[in-house]
Image (cartoon, rainbow, N blue to C red):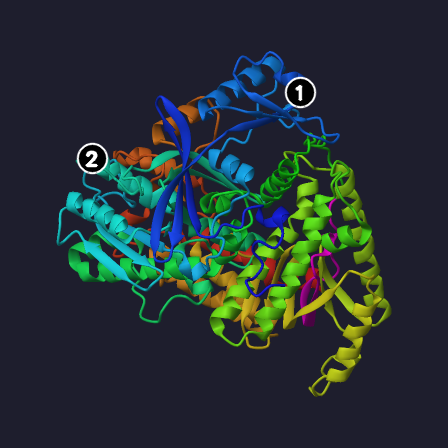
Amino acid sequence: MSAKGFAEHDPALYGASAEPGLVAVEHEERRGKPDRMALFWRRGTETVREEDAFTPFIVARRDVLEGCPVTHDARPLGGRGPLNTLALFGSWKECARAKTWMASATGFTAGNPEAPYLHLNDPVQQYLTSTGRTLFKGLEFSGLRRMQIDIECFTTPGYEFCNAEREGDAVIAVALGDNTGWTEVLSGREMSEKELIARTVATVRERDPDVIEGHNIFNFDLPYLSARARRYKVRLALGRDGSAPASRPGRFAVAERTIAYTRFDVFGRHVVDTLFLVHAYDVTHRSLDGFGLKEAALHFGLAPADRAYIEGARIAAEYRRAPEKVMRYVRDDVAETRGLADLLSRSVFYQTRMLPLSYQNACVRGNATKIDALMVREYLRRERALPLPDRARPFAGGYTDVFARGVVPNVHHCDIRSLYPSLMLAGRIAPRADELNVFLDMLDTLRTFRLEAKARMRSGRAADKRRHFDALQSAFKVLINSFYGYLGFAQGHFSDFDAAEEVTRRGRELLGGMLEWLKKNGARPVELDTDGIYFVPPPRCLPGPDGSPPDPAALDAFRRAFADWLPEGVEMEFDGEYRAMYSYKMKNYALLDFAGAMVIKGAALKSRGLEPFQRDFVREVLRLKLEGRDAELGALKTRFEKALREREWPIEALARTETLQDAPATYAAKVQKKQRPRDAAYELALKSGREYRAGDQVSYYITGSKKSVAVHENSRMMEDWDPERRDENVPYYLAKLEALYAKFGGESAQQELL
């Protein structure tokens, strides 16, 4: 492999064009003139704008184009795929008109998998697909100009969370930073809100970033700044052409999670929300306790020891009392955002060098969508017809099971490296519609690239080189592991549900064989999850009854024999040894490593629906059980009971915070029509007499003197809590504690888990 790296090596993966330095592409429609694409290139230290022609296209069945009233150039595509004609149009508007006509003529909208035409509804993706160009070729991650933004706002007394539509809820601080380490904090004590917003815009334009990053920037910082800028008639001219951001509803989906958000497009720049990156990370690792900036920074070790912390509801009061602390707080926020982006966005950066997508879209598009973009680009490059997506149907998934419950000491973990991709390559399982064999060729090349990147990462002496190749191999890994999911992707033009089913069948068969091998060789399986097994090695590989250390040679021999049993092309990695594992139920467990660190996975053990004191109790119960200190569980329960009865904790330990998804008036109308049950947060918002809106937060606790109460009738705003006249419902919270103890720590739980 050449010294210049992996880019330009394979046109199927990287596109046919090797031109370096492209950092952004934007579509421009001009009245009375042909459409153009604005291209922003990094030339040395300068960013240079150029323009290129744009010819939009639709790929359709030949007969579908007959009678199309929109002028176009029809070019035949070879091969057996039904979408066998490439129709080229003079402008994006004409292409859109043709799409509308085809939808009417065929009865299928463009988003329907059965539509006999393909229209990519993103002009940037169309341009990159047809030209073979991709962003960031020849650039390293450190060469990307990234700016972070974080704002803090005043909250009108009586409300818990600021709302841009309330007159008094002004922006009081803006922190700006970038990947050079530069940071600037703009204070509302030194300038008016209007001046603060104008200065923010001027700073962005002066420093000219390629990327604007923020944590929850789509649903908070940018919409807030936009609303306040409109109030003062300040043009939020963040674009490289001096334009204000365009916004529209968006949806970010990863695994079972879907987040509705307001998408902002800044001309010539990319907007990256680190909140989405954190969600994408957690879907793979399932180890985060929360997705907020503070929780993520603590999880990844990014929070400095002297970091300033202020509860969100206390920002306004702290600003009145000690504004300098708020300025330190927002400075720390922007530094942690930069750290998160440094850590989590590198692999997406390297994916973008391959994909016909903008960096912003690469951060929010699903992985199967990315594989489809690569497949479509390569087929069009070779002037070949496209197939229609396979008809979706259910099929049996991966093999998951639990074989032991409760605390299990000396647990090891083995992982099949890219199990499904390995089975696909070994068995030559590919989409039947892929007549050019692009699918397996790309998968094989990606695997080769990843092995090379990992080798360079391990051999690298400089830290920056190791980070570079680690991010590169991570980018390859994400795509590699997406090839199986693509087979069962209903929108994928090369999807194949029979092939997907065959992959999972072989996977279940292999994992079943692995379990039998472990049992026959003296090991004890604990849990199986699709491509990994938690197990206890055979006695000869464990510490002796007297505490003597295990024989490393015996463990090495056991592992070699297990790995050698696997079929050719399938590799195993032993990637974890734990002092103990608490197995609760499928995909819900806690691990304690030999350094004392504890990892909790699964919603049943760390539900965000629990009050803070409940989450703390579960964590302490799990640690005691994992450390073999079950005798102390009763004392732990007694300590928590005492704190509740004697009202030792601040009300924050008992309160719940909910975000209003609807306006209170909308909620009331639904309740009246019996379309939804009553809810404490909405009831409190309605009773307050204040103008709550969708997006506002309400924190409340439960009052009364009985353990069984109707929550919506016995709740009170947290802000109304009086520490001198405490009225929290002690029996109610004691009952919640008792239920948790019975579930995880009591005698019935002990018996169930034996």
170 vs 61, nearest the viewer: 61
Image location of residue 315, percent across then percent down: 25, 53
Q: Which mark is residue 62?
A: 1
Gap between marks 1 and 2, in whole Å?
52 Å
Q: How many marks?
A: 2
Residue type indicated by callout 2? Arg
Label 1 crowding class (10 Å Cα cut-off): few <14, some 14-19, many 20+? Answer: some
| In magenta segment, residue 398 | yes
Q: Residue at x 41, y 66 (%)?
A: 302
Q: Residue at x 42, y 48 (%)?
A: 272
Q: Is residue 54 above or below residue 128?
A: above
Question: Which residue lies under the disc numbered 2?
Answer: 231
Judged left or right of residue 686, residue 59 is right
Residue 299 appears in the figure: yes
Q: Secondary structure at mark 1?
A: helix
Q: Is residue 568 above or below residue 677?
A: below
Dot 1 or dot 2, earlier in sequence:
1
689 vs 30, nearest the viewer: 30
Q: Which mark is residue 104?
A: none
Image location of residue 677, percent across then percent down: 47, 31
Q: Quadrant of the N terminus?
A: bottom right
Please report contact status of discs 1 and 2: CB closer than 8 Å, yes or no. no
Q: Is residue 595 above or below residue 674?
A: below
Tell me where the magenta segment starts and ends, as one range: 397-420
Judged left or right of residue 643, residue 522 is right
Judged left or right of residue 201, residue 617 is right
